[in-house]
Amino acid sequence: MRIVLSSPLTDQEYYLKALAKFCPYADIRLWDAVKETSWQAEYALVWKPDNGLFLHQKELKAIFNLGAGIDALEKLPDLPKDTPLYKLRDAGMGQWMLEYILYGMIHFGRHFDRYQQYQSERRWQPELTTSLQEKSIGILGLGPLGQFVGDQLRQLGYNVAGWSRSAKKELSFDQFNGYENLDHFLSRSHFLVNLLPAKDETYHLLSEDRLMSLPRGAVVISVGRGSVIDEHALLVQLQTRHLRGALLDVFEHEPLSKEHPFWQQDNIVMTPHMAAPTQYEDAIKQILADILDIELDQGYRFL
């Protein structure tokens, strides 16, 4: 089995260790080491690769994206259309995402944003608090991560509903489907969790009007793709206090420019796209399971 790996330098060592652990018989090479040679891989494991990889590698049976979002790959002009493209479905990221979202709910729902301000003022002022289980949590996007997060929150006793363009089967929580039901879904979401991918149809889906559909005092938690939210509209709703706050891990342009007004907004908490880092061993195990399925479908036997 021949595998070419193209990933950020900070990740390569960990992926190589995981591949050596779970797939010691494979011929694994880094893209930078083979780009000037005639060597051809059967499988490509990539994260935001340069277009040259696909111009060079002509014998790929499948491409594996080392993350949940494939928007960067889809923009490459020479991405082979007839080669199967796989993305990570969870690979250990679900638990990290759940913890991040719970933090956002607790931070704003239990008034820790205000207590942080009071501490700087040496001010002793308890806030009236209601149970988070009395609030409605809306999961915008019901892919594998959205379904996992929604199910886990439901098991913890929270009132959860999800939205997607088409219906999903066997969910443990309520779901709304189609654009005709989006505004109603938003109107009941005290905590709105964006887990949508970057697509033409999701670009600025959360427009000014749709953000206004959220209940007054709602909180936006964005961990899908930043382009889903009209950032100017979000800023206005935060400045006017229609929205209580926002926890943002993703942005339309990353890294966020130093001039961006989000930096100065006191009811925004920002993190640098780290809500759910890829778990290297979990990712490689999932990828190797998919490769095994491909090989068996093609009549190969592993002895």
Image (cartoon, grey):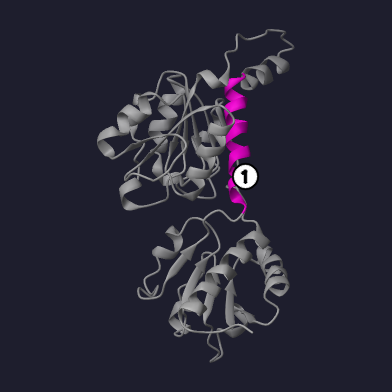
The residue lying toward the viewer, choosing from 10 and 3, is: 3
The x and y percentages for residue 54 are 45, 78
Residue at 60% x, 8% y is: 128
The x and y percentages for residue 300 are 52, 84
The x and y percentages for residue 240 are 43, 19
Question: Residue at the left extreme?
Answer: 180
The residue lying toward the viewer, choosing from 30 and 68, is: 68
- Quarter of the figure that contains the N terminus: bottom right
Q: Is residue 153 above or below residue 255?
A: above
> Which quadrant of the view contains residue 180?
top left
The x and y percentages for residue 71 are 43, 58
The residue lying toward the viewer, choosing from 24 and 292, is: 292
Residue with the mark numbered 1? 95
> Image check: 157 left or right of 121?
left
Q: Is residue 108 above or below residue 207?
A: above
Magenta segment: does it hold 134? Answer: no
* Element assignment for label 1: helix
Residue at 45% x, 34% y is: 173
- Quarter of the figure that contains the C terminus: bottom right
Badge 1: residue crowd in 10 Å (few <14, some 14–19, many ≥20): some
Which residues lie in the magenta part? 92-110
Q: Is residue 185 above or below residue 227?
A: above
**Residue 100 in sight in this render:** yes
> Image check: 233 left or right of 251?
left
Amino acid residing under circle 1: Gln
